[in-house]
Amino acid sequence: MKYQFEKYTKGNIVQIGIDAELIEKEIEEAYYDLKSAENSINDGNYKWAIVQSYYSMFHAFRGLLFSRGYREKSHTGLKFAIKSIFVDSGIMNNGTFLSFDFAMKAREEADYSYTYDEKLARNIIESNKTLISEVENLF
């Protein structure tokens, strides 16, 4: 994974100054998208629950990456950066990372292959809650 991170740092992952307001905004967006996912699942809209839950995870991880002075320019770049900086170094549980990776694939399946159901949506929302909690503990 380190090779992939190094590959992505060439223009796709850049160093930035640490901005507490930007980090807070990402966490706020993570909670907003989580709430939206919960509302969608309650309305029986499982596709959007998956999509919104993935974006909630994305924003939580983005805030975490910002807290270390990096910014990604792609979803895949974020994935490689989180794995390299937090998981490979033992700061974050690999299971949390795998939940994000699974949600990323489920979001793509929901969007492009129209594959989704209630059970999948509920599982991703629960994984999302765990992910946000772990991310907040790393600040």
Image (cartoon, rainbow, N blue to C red):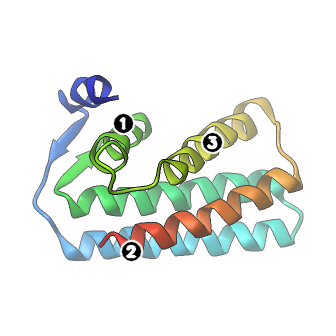
For residue 4, side relative to residue 109 (left or right)? left
Amino acid type of the residue that numbered disc 3 sits on in the rendered structure:
Phe
Query: Residue 41 appears at what percent x and percent y?
Result: 81, 66
Residue sitting farthest toward the left: 17
Q: Mark 2 points at which residue?
A: 137
Question: Closer to the N terminus: mark 2 or mark 1?
Answer: 1
Residue 121 found in image quarter: bottom right
Tags 3 and 1 touching, CB below 8 Å: no
On the image, the x and y values in percent for residue 53 come to 63, 59
Q: Where is residue 68 in the image (x, y as percent from the top left)?
A: 20, 58
How dense is the environment of label 1, judged by Cα within 10 Å: few (below 14), some, or many (20 and up)?
many
Q: In this view, does 129 lie above or below 123?
A: below
The C terminus is located in which quarter? bottom left
Q: Mark 1 points at which residue?
A: 80
Q: Which residue is drawn at 29% across and 70% down?
A: 23
**Disc 2/disc 3 C-alpha distance (Å):** 22 Å
Q: Which residue shows up at 13% across the image and 54% down it?
A: 16
Residue at the spot x=71%, y=53% of the render?
Answer: 50
Instruction: Identify the mark nearer the N-term, 2 or 3.
Output: 3
Specify whether 12 is left or right of 26: left
Q: In which quarter of the image is residue 77?
A: top left
Quarter of the picture containing the N terminus is top left
Residue at 20%, 51% (x, y): give it.
Answer: 70
Q: Is residue 103 left or right of residue 7?
A: right
**Front residue of 126 and 49:** 126
Name which residue type carries label 1: Phe
Look at the numbered disc 2 and give the secondary structure of its residue. Answer: helix
The residue that label 3 is drawn on is 102
Please state which amino acid type lies under the numbered disc 2. Answer: Asn
